[in-house]
Structures are given as structure tokens and as C-alpha cells.
Image (cartoon, rainbow, N blue to C red):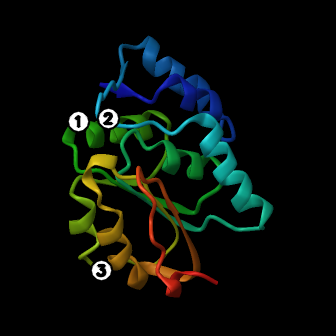
């Protein structure tokens, strides 16, 4: 079994989840160490949600593509998101995320399939999307092209990329 990293455990307190995460580690869960993954810092996650909150943005229905450990989606749950769908293609990470959510007593769906495949199916629209693929995949342009039909009006898309991202003019307000 796996657990979320300590930096996430330090941040998740809105739902009193931090102790649950520490209990998981104490009960034999381990932290995923993936040399090709990149981790968002606590400060980046905090700043992201502060910006959303400062503009009065309600989280609503959230999609966490390329979920990894689920840090962004779990943070959204801890801040009151109505629903979060996690999408992770790696089997071990998806299983870990399911176990983490179960242990934290959070109801959210984890889909184990490539993000591009997930986006081909029908889905209710999302108000917020976290798009944080492994940088080596260069998946952002293809995913951005498939997102519009899956977004609510005035939805927000958070993108982490190792290279600059050209935002289509139709995406700006």
C-alpha cells in the first residue's frame, strides 16, 4: 500500500484528514517515490486555491487528470469540492489513490486509464480541471484540444507544464 507524501498531509486539514494520513504511514503504508514524476509543492497548491478562493470561485465538480498521488484533487475535496474524478493511467498509483481515499473516508472515483482515453467518453461538465501530466509526455496541447466540450461555462483549467503553453484565444475571458 501507499500513502500521500508528508507535505500533503501537512496541508490537508480542512476535513481533519492529516491524522488519518499519518495513521496510514504508521500502519505500513509507504510513500510513492517515482523518479520521473514531479511533485507540486505545498506552496504551489496553496497559492492555486488561494487565487480561486480570492475570486469567489466555487469548486463544484473537479477533474484531476494525471492524478498521481491525487494531491490536487484531495486538496479540492478538503476545500469543499462537490465531486472529484481522478484519472491516473499507472496501476500502482491508481490503486494507491483508491486506498488513500478509502482510508480518508472520501467518496471519489479513481479511473485507471490514460487521460486522453478518458476524455473520449461522455462526462458531465467540470467546473475545474487540474492538468498536470508528466513533463516528458508533452500531453498538454492534445488534452487542451479535447477539454472544451467537458467544461462548464466559466470553468477553470489549471495546467502544470515543463514548457510554455500556448493558450488558444477562445480560452480567455
Point out which mark residue 96 bears. Answer: 2
User: Closest to the observer: 160 or 112?
Assistant: 160
Separation of residues labelled 3 and 2 (CA atoms):
26 Å
Q: Quadrant of the C terminus?
A: bottom right
Along the polypeptide, which appears first: circle 3 or circle 1?
1
Q: Of helix, strand and loop, which one carries label 1?
A: helix
Q: Residue at x 35, y 63 (%)?
A: 140
Q: Nearer the viewer, residue 155 or 97?
A: 155
In the rendered structure, the answer to whether residue 134 lies left or right of residue 6 reads left
Q: Residue 103: which disc? A: none
Give the residue drawn at x 36%, y 19%.
Answer: 29
The residue located at (54%, 26%) in the rendering is 20
Return the x and y of residue 70 as percentages of the image width and height: 43, 44
Q: Which residue is mark 1?
A: 92
Look at the numbered discs 2 and 1 and tell me whether their residues touch, using CB distance below 8 Å. Answer: yes
Whether residue 84 is visible to the viewer of this picture, yes or no, is yes
> Quick one: label 3 or label 2, which is nearer the N terminus?
2
Q: Position of residue 164 (x, y in %)?
A: 45, 60
Label 3 – label 1 distance at C-alpha: 25 Å
Q: Residues within 10 Å of mark 1 (few under 14, many from 20)?
A: some
Label 3 close to label 2 by CB (< 8 Å)? no
48 sits left or right of 157 in the view: right
Camera-side residue: 56 or 15? 56
Report x, y in % for residue 57: 71, 68
Residue that numbered label 3 is attached to: 122
- SS of the residue under disc 3: loop
Q: CA distance from mark 2 to mark 1?
A: 6 Å
Q: Residues within 10 Å of mark 2 (few under 14, many from 20)?
A: many
Is any atom of residue 134 visible in this view?
Answer: no
- Residue at 34%, 69% in the rendered image: 141
Amino acid at each position: 500500500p501507499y500513502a500521500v507524501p508528508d507535505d500533503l498531509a501537512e496541508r490537508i486539514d480542512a476535513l481533519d484528514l492529516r491524522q488519518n494520513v499519518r495513521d496510514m504511514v504508521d500502519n505500513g503504508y509507504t510513500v510513492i517515490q517515482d523518479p520521473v514524476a514531479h511533485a507540486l509543492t505545498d506552496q504551489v497548491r496553496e497559492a492555486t486555491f488561494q487565487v480561486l478562493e480570492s475570486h469567489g470561485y466555487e469548486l463544484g465538480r473537479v477533474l484531476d487528470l494525471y492524478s498521481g498521488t491525487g494531491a490536487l484533487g484531495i486538496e479540492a475535496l478538503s476545500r469543499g469540492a462537490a465531486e472529484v474524478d481522478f484519472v491516473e493511467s499507472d496501476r500502482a498509483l491508481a490503486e494507491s489513490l483508491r486506498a488513500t481515499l478509502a482510508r480518508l473516508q472520501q467518496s471519489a472515483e479513481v479511473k485507471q486509464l490514460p487521460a486522453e482515453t478518458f476524455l473520449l467518453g461522455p462526462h458531465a461538465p467540470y467546473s475545474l480541471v487540474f492538468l498536470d501530466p508528466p513533463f516528458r509526455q508533452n500531453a498538454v496541447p492534445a488534452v487542451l484540444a479535447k477539454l472544451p466540450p467537458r467544461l462548464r461555462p466559466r470553468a477553470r483549467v489549471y495546467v502544470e507544464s515543463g514548457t510554455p503553453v500556448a493558450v488558444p484565444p477562445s480560452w480567455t475571458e
